[in-house]
Image: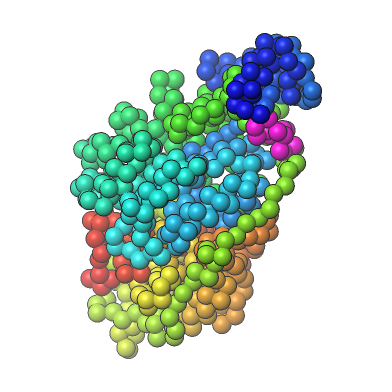
């Protein structure tokens, strides 16, 4: 059927001259335009909204039993890779919770596999009913001081800018390069501007004239607001603020009190990073809705943040509302408190009911995103940390936050001027090993307030260059954990007394598993329990996710890369010994 024929059919359906495909009866419809709740029924034809509030003849009828029909939920900013799931499994995980569209930034896999990684995410996402819109990663690597698997410049990104499903330029984390209009960064911004695309932001702690200069570059969003003051300043400067409720970073409840009827239309909901166990037990964007309403936000206004606002921010034609000619991406919920979906529709097709998928699709893994962990031959001697003084710069863990503290500590040296955890109770050795090209580069540092005892933990999920990170209190276990991760092609590994207690293979780019969400969630839960009970880790700190963010040199204060310590406040490398 041609577009013209389809439009004629839809006009006839709307005029009640032709039978509609589906009629949802006994329902209340969320009108995000007028901020009202109106009576149904709701008519659907050719995957589009036909109309509501009138009697229609239909081929099929669904009784909503007094439930509320809402537009499909939109996640305004998410990294699929951070769920440890491939796109086809991620879609299976979130669609039953009513999220039908996501704005995905694949900069995790891009830092490992470059354009091949982005193409894989696009190709895999197209095999699912989930509407995945990609933002091309702007910072691969995140800063010039890192060693990622690839470097993507404007001339690389432009190859994909017109690909179906590509929406714009992903979060610009290297804000100093924007403010100083560094040439390579400006080329990426101009590439997006020349193609009239959205540019996402990432500017934690930036304020005043620096923030104004950053926004002047055309950067339209920010998901890093943690205070109401930051949120209001960004809205005043014309940005959309993405209110984040992830597994590690939880800013939503801090920001809700700053939402008013006047500024609500500049607010969008997002998850950024959400673990599979968190999704499966508490939900996805519908969890954010539940929290927002529980803490005082009007339900219809909250729904608007999760639908229309995101659609308008990212220019998603036909998404975000229930009105004639809008896509019939919908969910039906029993109430506007729990937001538990009874039915989920994509393009008019019911794809989930009572939390269970009704449709199936095949998984997809590309060969060129496998076998990405490449290390030189390592021995225990590689982890030797020689001290030139007994005062050091150390990374302080802040439980529940991706922020770290820049500590200056007095430490004890052994007889060979080496750092030994046994002589320094409460401190651990941290190593970041370049794992993409087997260069042998390794950064060594000291971690405080993590508390690991008698063992080591190694991971290849390490934002954003995703080199191999290992923490421990002895070099022997650190080496065994590293070799286990290498043998798996990436993942998480826990070692104690030379034995692997638990591990999770992540063979896709060292970031993702091809296993179902529940299996991945169960294994991660097992690893966390083992880490908590066998390693004595600070009970307030997440044993695994804490390590994942120890390498991100755009989040204050002190981080470790494969090139050594990095002071985020001064935006410069820094020596370990003072």
Q: Position of residue 252 (x, y in %)?
A: 48, 37
> Is residue 89 magenta-colored?
no
Q: Which residue is painted at 25% across and 69% down in the image?
A: 575
In the displayed structure, 464 sits above or below 222; it is below
Please state, as top left, top right, bottom left or bottom right, where the N terminus lies in the image. top right
Please state, as top left, top right, bottom left or bottom right, where the C terminus lies in the image. bottom left
Q: Position of residue 476 (x, y in %)?
A: 49, 83
Q: Which quarter of the picture shows residue 391?
A: bottom left
In the shown orientation, is residue 447 left or right of residue 48?
left
In the displayed structure, 254 sits above or below 161; it is above
Question: In terms of depth relative to the viewer, which is nearer, 70 or 19?
Answer: 19
Q: Which quarter of the picture shows residue 206?
A: top left
- Does residue 248 appear in the picture of this structure? no
Q: Which residue is painted at 30% across and 30% down in the image?
A: 237
Q: Position of residue 88 (x, y in %)?
A: 62, 51
- Does residue 576 appear in the picture of this structure? yes
In the displayed structure, 375 sits above or below 109; it is below
Q: Which residue is painted at 66% across and 59% down in the image?
A: 515
In the shown orientation, is residue 257 left or right of residue 514?
left
Query: How has the structure been colored for display?
Result: rainbow
In the shown orientation, is residue 491 left or right of residue 215?
right
Per the rendered image, the range of residues in magenta is: 342-353
In the displayed structure, 414 sits above or below 96; it is below
Question: In terms of depth relative to the viewer, which is nearer, 223 or 489?
Answer: 489
**Main secondary-structure element of the magenta-colored stretch:** strand
Q: Position of residue 400 (x, y in %)?
A: 47, 52
Question: In terms of depth relative to the viewer, which is nearer, 430 or 305?
Answer: 305
Q: Which residue is painted at 44% across and 20% down in the image?
A: 261
């Amino acid at each position: 059927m041609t577009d013209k024929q389809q439009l004629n059919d839809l006009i006839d359906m709307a005029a009640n001259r032709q039978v509609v495909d589906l009629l949802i009866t006994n329902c209340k419809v969320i009108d995000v335009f007028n901020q009202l709740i109106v009576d149904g029924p709701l008519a659907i034809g050719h995957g589009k909204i036909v109309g509501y509030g009138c009697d229609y003849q239909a081929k099929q009828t669904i009784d909503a039993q007094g439930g509320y029909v809402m537009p499909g939920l939109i996640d305004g900013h998410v990294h699929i890779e951070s769920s440890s799931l491939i796109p086809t499994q991620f879609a299976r995980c979130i669609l039953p919770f009513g999220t039908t569209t996501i704005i995905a930034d694949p900069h995790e896999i891009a830092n490992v596999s470059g354009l091949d990684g982005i193409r894989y995410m696009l190709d895999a996402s197209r095999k699912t009913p989930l509407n995945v819109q990609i933002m091309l990663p702007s910072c691969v690597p995140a800063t010039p001081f890192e060693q990622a698997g690839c470097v993507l410049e404007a001339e690389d990104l432009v190859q994909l800018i017109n690909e179906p499903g590509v929406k714009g330029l992903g979060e610009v984390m290297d804000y100093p390069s924007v403010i100083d209009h560094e040439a390579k960064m400006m080329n990426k911004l101009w590439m997006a501007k020349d193609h009239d695309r959205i540019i996402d932001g990432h500017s934690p702690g930036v304020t005043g004239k620096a923030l104004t200069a950053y926004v002047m570059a055309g950067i339209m969003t920010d998901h890093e607001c943690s205070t109401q003051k930051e949120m209001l300043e960004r809205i005043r400067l014309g940005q959309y603020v993405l209110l984040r409720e992830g597994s590690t970073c939880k800013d939503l409840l801090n920001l809700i009190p700053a939402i008013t009827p006047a500024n609500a239309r500049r607010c969008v909901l997002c998850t950024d990073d959400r673990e599979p166990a968190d999704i499966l037990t508490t939900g996805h964007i519908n969890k954010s809705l539940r929290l927002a309403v529980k803490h005082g936000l009007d339900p219809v206004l909250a729904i608007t943040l999760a639908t229309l606002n995101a659609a308008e921010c990212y220019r998603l034609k036909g998404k975000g509302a229930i009105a004639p000619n809008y896509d019939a991406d919908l969910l039906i919920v029993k109430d506007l408190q729990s937001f538990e979906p009874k039915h989920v529709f994509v393009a008019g097709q019911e794809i989930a009911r009572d939390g269970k998928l009704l449709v199936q699709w095949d998984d997809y893994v590309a060969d060129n995103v496998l076998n990405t962990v490449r290390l030189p031959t390592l021995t225990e001697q590689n982890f030797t940390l020689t001290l030139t003084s007994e005062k050091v710069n150390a990374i302080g863990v802040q439980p529940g936050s991706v922020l770290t503290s820049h500590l200056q500590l007095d430490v004890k040296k052994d007889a060979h001027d080496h750092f030994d955890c046994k002589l320094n109770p409460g401190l651990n050795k941290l190593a970041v090993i370049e794992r993409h090209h087997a260069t042998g580069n390794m950064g060594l540092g000291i971690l405080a307030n993590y508390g690991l005892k008698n063992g080591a933990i190694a991971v290849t999920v390490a934002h954003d260059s995703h080199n191999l990170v290992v923490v421990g209190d002895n070099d022997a276990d650190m080496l065994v954990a590293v070799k286990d991760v290498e043998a798996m092609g990436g993942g998480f590994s826990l070692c104690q007394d030379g034995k692997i207690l638990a591990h999770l293979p992540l063979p896709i780019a060292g970031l993702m598993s091809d296993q179902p969400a529940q299996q991945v969630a169960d294994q991660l839960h097992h690893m966390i329990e083992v880490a908590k009970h066998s390693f004595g880790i600070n009970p307030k700190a997440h044993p695994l996710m804490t390590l994942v963010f120890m390498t991100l040199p755009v989040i204050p204060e002190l981080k470790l890369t494969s090139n050594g310590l990095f002071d985020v406040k001064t935006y410069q490398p820094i020596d370990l010994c003072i």
